[in-house]
Image (spheres, rainbow, N blue to C red):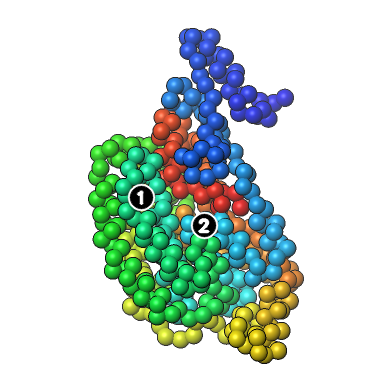
């Protein structure tokens, strides 16, 4: 049998035996995961160790593979949205909005300006929530629990905003083809404005706790670095690519949802190490706050959904009292409205990078093919390359800074 077909622990046995014969010392095989608390998800990495130093490693995926793409081929378009929630569940509204925009591109629907601005607000709030989780948990993985406890209450406040808008918190199933299911209430805007008033001071305190903390810097600088060339060859995008020094952001390069209307900077690092990834995400939170403030200040008047009765669910009160509305509701949910034959790809700047939807339709009630481009699936391929020669504790910090989300990895 070819060595490549053997499990990693069997392939490593030869290296372990050779090392023992050379100088009497022994290498060891460490199974990091799939359910170790430090992996923050169902990941397995089989590592070849020399003491605490990593000589080689191989990751396995698929522990929570749920066949989303195959399921999507058997679901009407409206019923696919809950699948997108369960990829990067740390910023589910971005997944939702990306899917709606993909469908709108396929159907040739132009959504009102107000809808585009509302989408920007909710996507940037989701980005902030995602970065709160990533950077505060990185603090925990390097021994600093205080920052995590301090900022997590503001992730909760973002979830309260979600709840006010759509009734859900983590897996939001937010929005509709062409817009939102209802206009945002005054209470939603009140919660957003309160968050915008309070959170900047909290985030500044969090940065002061860690950014120039000598222990944190020693644990993260030159840990898990990746060069710009190698990051691009793997297909990195988002904060992990920008931390390596590549100025690439979908919101700037391929603007969608009126992102071209807003002024913001794209934070870029230099060394592509764990510290740079932390700093880039910190800076992105400030830029997201800037975008949200501009969107609130310039929010246009107008409808909260496009005028597309063939695809937009009628109001619930009409469904209960009007036969035509009931028929439309049934036809839309069950996928009985014909969809044009087309092939589209639409990317959005997700919390972790380029989240893309590649959709092929054949005119039937379900997609002929739907592929999710998940950034975490790409990052995880590079993980074992990034930790070779590093200490075991460095591997934990590196994985945390890449923000690999199991649900997105194994869709």
Q: Quadrant of residue 202?
A: bottom left
**Relative to the observer, which residue lies in front, 273 or 139?**
139
Label 1 Cα crowd, 10 Å radius (few <14 / some 14-19 / many 20+): some
Query: What's the residue at 33%, 78% (across, down)?
Result: 297
Residues at circles 2 and 1 in contact by the CB criterion of under 8 Å: no
Kindly identify which numbered label has been placed on residue 148.
1
Label 2 Cα crowd, 10 Å radius (few <14 / some 14-19 / many 20+): many
Residue 343, position as x, y percentages in the image: 66, 66
Kindly identify which numbered label has been placed on residue 366.
none
Q: Is residue 90 shown above or below 307? A: above
Query: What's the residue at 24%, 50% (across, down)?
Result: 208
Query: What's the residue at 34%, 45% (across, down)?
Result: 145
Q: Secondary structure at mark 1?
A: helix
**Relative to the observer, which residue lies in front, 355 or 118?**
118
Q: Nearer the viewer, mark 2 or mark 1?
A: 1
Q: Can residue 71 be seen in this snapshot?
A: yes
Query: What's the residue at 54%, 25% (across, down)?
Result: 29
Kindly identify which numbered label has been placed on residue 89.
2
Q: Secondary structure at mark 2?
A: helix
Residue 322, position as x, y percentages in the image: 67, 90
Q: Is residue 237 shown above or below 357? A: above
| Total marks in image | 2
- Which of the image's four quarters has the N terminus? top right
Q: Can residue 225 be seen in this snapshot?
A: no
What distance separates the C-alpha of mark 2 from that of mark 1?
A: 18 Å
**Relative to the observer, which residue lies in front, 300 or 329?**
329
Residue 151, position as x, y percentages in the image: 34, 55
Q: Going by the image, does 98 lie left or right of 143?
A: right
Mark with earlier residue (2, 1):
2
């Amino acid at each position: 049998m070819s060595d490549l077909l053997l499990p990693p622990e069997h392939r490593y046995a030869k290296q372990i035996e050779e090392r023992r014969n050379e100088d009497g010392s022994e290498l060891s095989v460490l199974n990091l995961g799939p359910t170790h608390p430090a992996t923050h998800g169902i990941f397995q990495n089989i590592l070849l160790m020399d003491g605490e130093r990593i000589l080689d490693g191989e990751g396995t995926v698929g522990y929570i593979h749920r066949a989303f793409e195959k399921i999507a081929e058997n679901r009407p378009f409206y019923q696919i949205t809950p699948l997108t929630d369960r990829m990067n569940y740390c910023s589910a509204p971005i997944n939702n909005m990306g899917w709606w925009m993909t469908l709108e591109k396929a159907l040739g629907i132009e959504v009102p300006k107000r809808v585009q601005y509302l989408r920007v607000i909710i996507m940037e709030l989701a980005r902030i929530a995602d970065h709160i989780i990533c950077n505060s948990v990185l603090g925990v993985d390097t021994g600093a629990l205080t920052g995590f406890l301090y900022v997590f209450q503001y992730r909760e406040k973002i979830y309260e905003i979600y709840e006010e808008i759509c009734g859900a918190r983590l897996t939001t199933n937010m929005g509709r083809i062409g817009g939102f299911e209802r206009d945002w209430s005054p209470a939603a805007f009140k919660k957003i404005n309160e968050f915008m008033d309070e959170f900047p001071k909290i985030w500044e305190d969090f940065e002061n706790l860690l950014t120039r903390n000598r222990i944190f810097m020693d644990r993260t600088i030159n840990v898990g670095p990746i060069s710009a060339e190698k990051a691009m060859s793997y297909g990195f995008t988002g904060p992990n690519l920008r931390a390596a020094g590549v100025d690439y952001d979908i919101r700037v390069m391929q603007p969608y949802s009126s992102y071209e209307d807003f002024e913001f900077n794209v934070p870029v690092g230099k060394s592509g190490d764990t510290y740079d990834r932390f700093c880039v995400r910190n800076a992105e939170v400030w830029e997201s706050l800037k975008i949200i403030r501009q969107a609130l200040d310039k929010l246009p008047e107008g409808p909260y959904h496009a005028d597309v009765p063939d695809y937009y669910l009628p109001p619930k009160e009409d469904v209960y009292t009007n036969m035509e509305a009931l028929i439309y509701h049934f036809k839309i949910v069950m996928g009985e409205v014909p969809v044009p034959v087309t092939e589209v790809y639409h990317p959005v700047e997700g919390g972790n990078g380029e989240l893309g939807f590649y959709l092929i339709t054949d005119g039937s009630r379900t997609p002929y093919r739907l592929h999710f481009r998940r950034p975490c699936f790409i990052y995880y391929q590079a993980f074992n390359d990034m930790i070779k020669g590093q200490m075991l504790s460095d591997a934990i910090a590196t994985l945390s800074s890449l923000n690999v989300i199991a649900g997105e990895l194994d869709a």
